[in-house]
Amino acid sequence: MKLVHPEWQSQIVFQENRVQVLCIENAGYFSRTIQELLYQRETGKGKFVLSNGADVYELGKTTELILSPFQLNFDDKRFQTNIVKRLVKIANEDEYLESQEIRNSVLQYFYQLTGRLEYDVEVGSEFDIQQLVKLANVRPAFSDESLEASVVDYFSLLRDVLGIKLILCVNLRNYFAAERLKSFYETILLKKINLLLLENFAKNDKIDCEDWLIVDEDLCEI
């Protein structure tokens, strides 16, 4: 998989066991690049092209842009919606018989409840397993032990629940000491998560698993 832009001579190619770093030292161009990514993800209009062979991906559906690791939204409705869909699929296929038993038991319970009323009511027979799954209020679980653990959990959710193919992060390297960054990379690479770090200056020395593309103050690529 690769990310290209017509203003760049170089392609950003995502490879197994490698983390891609794009360091744009020109502050104005760095800001414009982030703005363009945001706009293209929201509207579908832009010059970035993310592809894998002949397949070209829509950025809004296949990428996530993280502006701050302190603003990770684990309550994002997209997570719950997709989790509910997956649970309903399992309930209606792999656990079909047990699901029907539970559905019938719930209906029987409501018949008992309504039978104790002093007036006549009807219980809706269209009750389905999806309604029951939603009542369970299933939410993503995550670790709050450290910033590193929270970020790893969030990235895993993006890939596993939403099918995100590429995660882009703004200045993420600056939030970790060198040793913690190495540990973070090890976990991310083990999970085979494609990561592009968008940096405007280099706080730490290059780490062995990183591939760097630098755009300097004069917009020359190094």
Image (cartoon, rainbow, N blue to C red):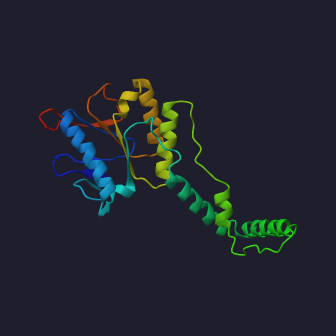
Relative to 90, is 148 on the left or the right? left
The residue sitting at 39% across, 57% down in the picture is: 61
Q: Position of residue 120 (x, y in %)?
A: 82, 75
Q: Position of residue 205 (x, y in %)?
A: 31, 25
Residue 161 visible in this rendered orientation of the protein: no
**Quadrant position of the C terminus in the picture:** top left
* Relative vertical location of residue 170 with respect to residue 58 in this rendering, above or below: above
Relative to 9, is 195 on the left or the right? right
Check the image and name the residue furthest to the front.
118
* Relative vertical location of residue 184 with respect to residue 54 in this rendering, above or below: above
* Relative vertical location of residue 100 with respect to residue 194 in this rendering, above or below: below
Relative to 85, is 49 on the left or the right? left
Residue 207 visible in this rendered orientation of the protein: yes
The residue sitting at 74% across, 70% down in the picture is: 100
The residue sitting at 18% across, 34% down in the picture is: 26
- How many numbered tags mark residues here? 0
Q: Position of residue 107 (x, y in %)?
A: 78, 69
Identify which residue, 98 or 74, lies in the foreground: 74
The residue sitting at 52% across, 35% down in the picture is: 149
Q: Position of residue 35 (x, y in %)?
A: 26, 45
Identify which residue, 123 or 105, lies in the foreground: 123
Q: Quadrant of residue 32?
A: top left
Q: Quadrant of residue 169?
A: top left
Q: Quadrant of residue 20?
A: top left
* Relative vertical location of residue 106 with respect to residue 176 in this rendering, above or below: below
